[in-house]
């Protein structure tokens, strides 16, 4: 017989919950545990079988007209939907097609909300698209939503957001002066970092997001954003403090790498490094304004 809550004291229950949170289990998705890896394999197999059945099914009648002599009737191949992607590569290709077809930020948001190729969508409360001013000269891109972002539906919420607001204020900026987004728009469970396949799947949306917002300066916060958008292999502590460039469309703009506010909350001694990066951002903006 398993341990029941009634067998524990209030203090023991509190200690157990705190242990779960420290381990990254900070939300209850269901009453029973699930093997998400097995479910993903089963879903992929079901989609594969469905696609096979669709390919082998006879074509529908076309207004009672028989095929021309010497020609066999064959169904017109249909473009697969993003939900039918059975591998990270296929999901990334589907995301690239959807992102490329979005001509406005509103269209991009709708395309991302309709996309089912990222498994994180099934565990997140909602998609976290953007916040701030989409016409701003500065765009800040983080890694992925945290728990507060997931609840509020906007990037950099809660304590991390308040810290970011103070960081921006230190160089004379506010949320109204910047545009905020994440590489991955759905929260990974337990606030973990997005995996490489999850990042690769969502990267086409992030790249198109930057292109449509058309910032004059791009700021990447954290390992995932720096590695995915700037092509760096180093972690953020080694990558930061250097000048970069980011190309989109026909433009190439200055880019900077700095620490994620969530990281700074856990490692406050590194705030001095973030302050150096903020001064570099201010210098870049002053240089652009003087041209």
Image: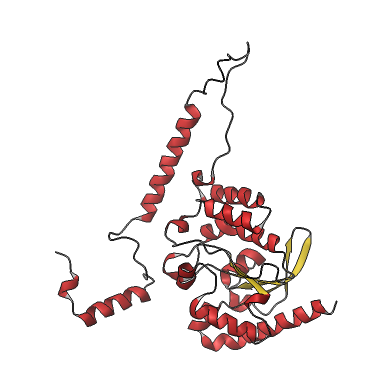
> Is 147 left, or right, of 76 in this rendering?
left
Q: Residue extending furthest right?
A: 291
Residue 257 visible in the picture: no
**Quarter assignment of residue 36:** bottom left
Give coordinates of residue 232: x percent, y percent.
64, 68
Q: Residue at x 37, y 76 (%)?
A: 22
> Is 204 left, or right, of 291 in this rendering?
left
Quarter of the rendering occupied by the N terminus: bottom left
Q: Residue at x 59, y 85 (%)?
A: 166
Q: Residue extending furthest top?
A: 69
Q: Is residue 145 above or below residue 159?
A: above
> Is 197 left, or right, of 30 in this rendering?
right
Q: Is residue 258 above or below residue 38?
A: below
Quarter of the rendering occupied by the C terminus: bottom right
**Quarter assignment of residue 138:** bottom right
Give coordinates of residue 265: x percent, y percent.
50, 83
Q: Residue at x 58, y 47 (%)?
A: 94
Give coordinates of residue 163: x percent, y percent.
55, 83
Q: Residue at x 31, y 60 (%)?
A: 30
Counting labels gives 0
Residue 199 visible in the picture: yes
> Is 197 left, or right, of 286 in this rendering?
left
Near-viewer residue (11 or 232):
11
């Amino acid at each position: 017989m398993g341990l029941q809550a009634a067998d524990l004291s209030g203090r023991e229950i509190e200690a157990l919950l705190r242990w779960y949170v420290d381990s990254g289990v900070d939300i209850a998705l269901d009453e029973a545990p699930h093997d998400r890896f097995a479910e993903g394999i089963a879903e992929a197999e079901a989609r594969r079988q469905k696609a096979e059945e669709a390919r082998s099914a006879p074509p529908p009648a076309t207004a009672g007209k028989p095929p021309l002599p010497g020609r066999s009737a064959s169904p017109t191949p249909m473009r697969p939907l993003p939900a039918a992607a059975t591998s990270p590569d296929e999901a990334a290709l589907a995301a690239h097609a959807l992102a490329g077809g979005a001509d406005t930020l509103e269209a991009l948001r709708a395309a991302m909300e309709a996309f089912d190729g990222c498994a994180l969508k099934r565990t997140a409360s909602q998609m976290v698209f953007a916040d701030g001013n989409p016409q701003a000269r500065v765009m800040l891109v983080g890694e992925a939503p945290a728990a507060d972002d997931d609840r509020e539906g906007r990037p950099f919420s809660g304590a991390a957001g308040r810290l970011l607001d103070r960081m921006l204020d230190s160089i004379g900026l506010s949320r109204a002066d910047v545009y905020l987004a994440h590489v991955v728009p759905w929260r990974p469970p337990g606030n973990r970092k997005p995996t490489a396949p999850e990042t690769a799947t969502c990267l086409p949306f992030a790249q198109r997001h930057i292109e449509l917002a058309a910032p004059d300066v791009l700021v990447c916060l954290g390992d995932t954003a720096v590695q995915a958008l700037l092509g760096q292999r180093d972690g953020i502590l080694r990558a930061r403090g250097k000048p970069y460039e980011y190309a989109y469309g026909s433009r190439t703009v200055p880019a900077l790498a700095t620490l994620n506010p969530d990281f700074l909350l856990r490692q406050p001694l590194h705030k001095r490094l973030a302050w150096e990066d903020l001064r570099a951002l201010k210098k870049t903006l002053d240089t652009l304004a003087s041209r």
